Image (cartoon, grey):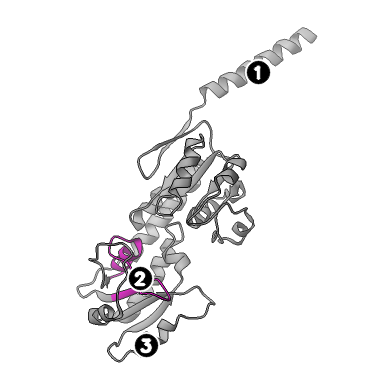
Amino acid sequence: MRFRRVVGAVILLLMQGWSTTLAEPVVVMDDIGREVVLTAPAKRVVSLAPHLTETLFALGVGDQIVGTVRYADFPAAAQQIPRFGDAFSVNVESVIGARPDIVFAWQTGGTMRSVNRIADLGVPVYINEAPTPAAIARSIEALSVLVGVPDRGAALAAQYRDTLASLRRKSERPVPVFFQISDERLYTVNDRHLIGQSISWCGGRNVFADLAIPVPLVSEESVVAARPRLIVLTRVPGSEPSSWFRRWQDHSALSARVVGIDPNLISRPGIRMVDGIAAMCELIAAVTD
């Protein structure tokens, strides 16, 4: 009897070994063309951008995030995750100490030097960079595969694509729009920036679309000369409005409608950006009606 138990245990171990050997690795191409390979779906994740943290929670794996960055504040549960840095600096030692199976990072963020160090230390890194609002759907799918919930990712991506398509507006006379990012200096976006593309998607015309820099600094005089019919400023709900609201509203040389939009929706290239685009479309439609 004892011999049979020993033989059975050996057979079980061999079967487990074969199962591990035969299991296919998880392979995904990231957004800068690098192949990311995991031996199994990730269970411990570090997310180095707020929009990536939001997407992971939407995929139902928020409890697997062992570290994130400052301003990763949605949903509320994300605020309880340890912070390993911000958009400009990441504590590499803290990331490595968290023993992640994978690190998700954003190329546009200012942390690529730290991210490259993490990769050099042998931690798999997926670099995210969606060049268009539509490309965000692919990011959702890629993340879902790497964390082992591809069906959930496919469903969310399909829903995102359907909603985005429903928002598309074409106009023979696009509404001239000035989008202001900063409360102090006049930073805006060109047509290669995701926000600029969102304006066009909604039937608007970004008055600074043709500038060479994605986030250029412009002058008050150039804004007035562009004659926007809609001025959109970023404003977190519940916060005090920028002094520019009143300044633009009272400007003698302008007759534009001045409104605010939640920057957490329109500037984070994650799953909630489609809500930001919907808000932008509403603002533009209100001018055309």
The spot of residue 154 in percent (x, y) is 44, 47
Specify the label residue 266 is tagged with.
Answer: none
Q: Position of residue 139 (x, y in %)?
A: 42, 49
Task: Name which residue type carries label 1.
Answer: Leu
**Which residue is nearer to you in this view: 19 or 1?**
19
Q: Is residue 38 above or below residue 190?
A: above
Q: Position of residue 232 (x, y in %)?
A: 37, 76
Compare residues 229 and 180 and report the one nearer the observer: 180
- 209 in magenta: no
Do residues under tags 1 and 2 come within 8 Å of each other at their CB atoms? no
Residue at image location 41% in from the left, 87% down from the top: 246
Q: Which residue is mark 3?
A: 249
Q: Name the amino acid, label 3.
A: Gln
Position above or below: 33 against 175: above
Q: CA distance from mark 1 to mark 2?
A: 62 Å
User: Pointer 2: what residue?
Assistant: 187
Depth check: give the residue in front, 259 or 166. Answer: 259
Residue on which the image places disc 1: 13
Return the x and y of residue 281 as percentages of the image width and height.
36, 71
Amino acid type, mark 2:
Tyr
Q: Residue at x 44, y 83 (%)?
A: 243
Q: Is residue 255 left or right of residue 21?
A: left
Mark 1 surroundings within 10 Å by alpha-carbon count, few (fewer than 14), some (14 through 19), many (20 or more): few
First-in-chain label (1 vs 2) = 1
Q: Residue furthest left?
A: 172
Q: Quadrant of the N terminus?
A: top right
On whether residue 197 falls in the magenta region, the answer is yes
Q: Which is more N-terminal, label 1 or label 3?
A: 1
Nearest the eye: 139 or 195: 195
Which region shows up in magenta? 177-204
